[in-house]
Image (cartoon, helix red, strand yellow):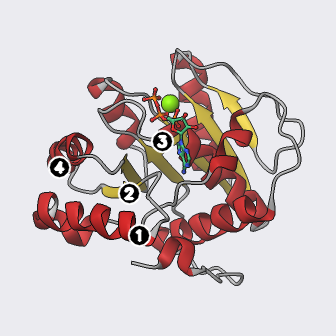
Amino acid sequence: MAQIVSIIGNKGGTGKTTLSHMIAHGLGLLGKQSVCVLTDLTREKLSKASRTYLPYDARSPDNLDKVMRTIQNVPDWYGVVDGGGNRPATDRMLADPADLILLPFRDSHEDMRTVAQDLERFPRARALPSQWPVDLEERALADDGIEKILANFRHRVLPPVPTISASKLLLQSDVPPLPPILDRVCRDLATQIFRLWGQPLDQATPSDLVGGR
Ligand SMILES: Nc1ncnc2c1ncn2[C@@H]1O[C@H](COP(=O)(O)OP(=O)(O)OP(=O)(O)O)[C@@H](O)[C@H]1O
Ligand SMILES: [Mg+2]
């Protein structure tokens, strides 16, 4: 059964960590047990309190090996692996066991050029527009960038995840009460991940916030 999504990519700051927590949170809201796997040496471990998922510190190779094996062998647990920028060798290691590989990129030509290279390197991966503009005019411009710069990979570009300021709350050590809009975006994102894993999901009700492309 498909159970691991790895969020990787060579460019820093594209939203890997935030998206990892959003997906894990969304899976939790869908009633699934999920682990958000921290591999980035420059990030702090987060507490489990008030979360719908388990943050796991896999910054040591031993812990990473342990958690990956556990997720692969325990039914009904899902792993969301947060990569780190500028670590091509680690990216490859995190991609290999994944059932789904996501490469986030922002609305910038540099991000799009970098993600095009990553899409070449990881033929199974999908590109995920991240922190995408919600203003209609800005969104149209951003979408236009995809059509131009990522034309050859258009079929591998997923619907965008919108800019949502409240997403940073998930990265606080202790999570405060979250606004419903964030829950909705995270639930939609997790629903989409389930669909890409090829798994049925009863509660699948994505809104056009994430599925509007
Ligand atoms: N959907 C979003 N809406 C608004 N802000 C976002 C969103 N996703 C990420 N951000 C912001 O963008 C910045 C970079 O995000 P994040 O740290 O998740 O990127 P990263 O790819 O993990 O970075 P690194 O390469 O350093 O690991 C952070 O300030 C984060 O709060
Ligand atoms: Mg990160």
Measured as percent of width and height from the top left, residue 93 is found at 36, 32
Q: Nearer the viewer, residue 107 or 156?
A: 107
Name the N-terminal-most of marks 4 and 2.
4
Q: CA distance from mark 2 to mark 1?
A: 7 Å
Q: In the rendered image, which residue does mark 2 sit on?
A: 129
Q: CA distance from mark 4 to mark 1?
A: 16 Å
Q: In the rendered image, which residue does mark 1 sit on?
A: 159
Mark 2 secondary-structure assignment:
strand
Residue 116 bears which disc, if any?
A: 4
Measured as percent of width and height from the top left, residue 141 is found at 28, 64
Q: Is mark 3 within 8 Å of ligand 1?
A: yes
Q: Relative to 91, say whether 72 is above or below.
A: below
Label 3, residues with CA under 10 Å away: few <14, some 14-19, many ≥20: many
Measured as percent of width and height from the top left, residue 85 is found at 37, 27
Say whether residue 93 is left or right of residue 114: right
Mark 3 secondary-structure assignment:
loop
Q: Are marks 2 and 1 in contact (CB under 8 Å)?
A: yes
Say whether residue 76 is left or right of residue 51: left
Residue 15 bears which disc, if any?
A: 3
Label 2, residues with CA under 10 Å away: few <14, some 14-19, many ≥20: many
Label 4, residues with CA under 10 Å away: few <14, some 14-19, many ≥20: many
Q: Mark 2 belongs to which amino acid?
A: Pro
Name the N-terminal-most of marks 3 and 1.
3
Q: CA distance from mark 4 to mark 2?
A: 12 Å
Q: Are marks 2 and 3 in contact (CB under 8 Å)?
A: no
Q: Nearer the viewer, mark 4 or mark 2?
A: 2
Q: Are marks 4 and 3 in contact (CB under 8 Å)?
A: no
Q: Mark 1 belongs to which amino acid?
A: Pro
